[in-house]
Amino acid sequence: MAVNDLYRLHFFINCSEQVTQCVLGYRMDFGSMDADTLEALCQAFIDDAQPKLLLLLSENALVSRVQVTTVTNHQEVPGLVDQVSQFGNIVSQTLPPNMAAIIHLPTNAPNAKHNGRIFLAGIPEQGQDAGTLTGAQITLNQAFADELAIDLEPTAPQDAIFTPVVISTVLNGAPRIPPVGFPVLLPVAKSLVRQQRRRKTVHFGFGS
């Protein structure tokens, strides 16, 4: 691992017996860590951001694991934390797994296509009305969204800083070599629930 390396952090939500995945981007901006410490990046997300995630999910939604994969250094072995699975906090049935709340991840990229977004399954039924999130649910979603603009700083075995980015792998229709990470600015929790048919059992993640 080295400064400016790019990583994808995947977290998995089990919802109505369907496993959904959200993908976030990070860039190492300080430090020099061994490959083994990819797990430390996973753990930093679990410690810092995941508590806010659990607060917005239904009690029937289960966060099961966090994994980090490399984008710019494919020789590294992926980091994985199979944590003790944790359920969401809200006492309510869960919306179907293809019904997702959206968090928009704006960047300073010159092309708006390089902005990111994630689709969160596991939203409680009581947190929406006819496809529009309640004010209370938006507040919870925004609290988690705010965490997605904050650096992750695992401290063991060595200090490091990982900056949230949206990773761009395509430029003008061709592979972008090397990929670029555009820093995330001020994430926004959107008010509408979206149906994502094609993402039902595969990736809930940013696409750029």
Image (cartoon, grey):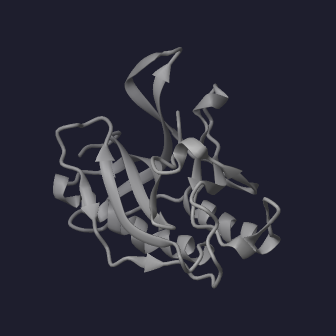
Quarter of the view holding residue 76? top left
Q: Can the viewer see residue 114? A: yes
x, y (%) of residue 84?
Answer: 33, 78
Is residue 187 at all visible to an observer of this figure?
Answer: no
Determine the residue positioned at 63% across, 85% down.
Answer: 91
Q: How many marks?
A: 0
The residue closer to the viewer here, 183 or 134, is 134
Residue at image coords 59%, 45%: 197
Please give left or right for residue 196 compared with residue 161 in the image. right
Image-based side of 94 in relation to 193, left or right: left
Residue 166 % position (x, y) = 51, 41
Q: Residue at x 57, y 67 (%)?
A: 122
Image location of residue 19, percent across then percent down: 43, 59
In percent of the image, x 82 and y 62: which residue is there? 130
Residue lying farthest to the bottom in this orientation: 91
Find residue 191 and report its image quarter.
bottom right
Residue 24: horizontal and vertical position, in percent? 47, 50
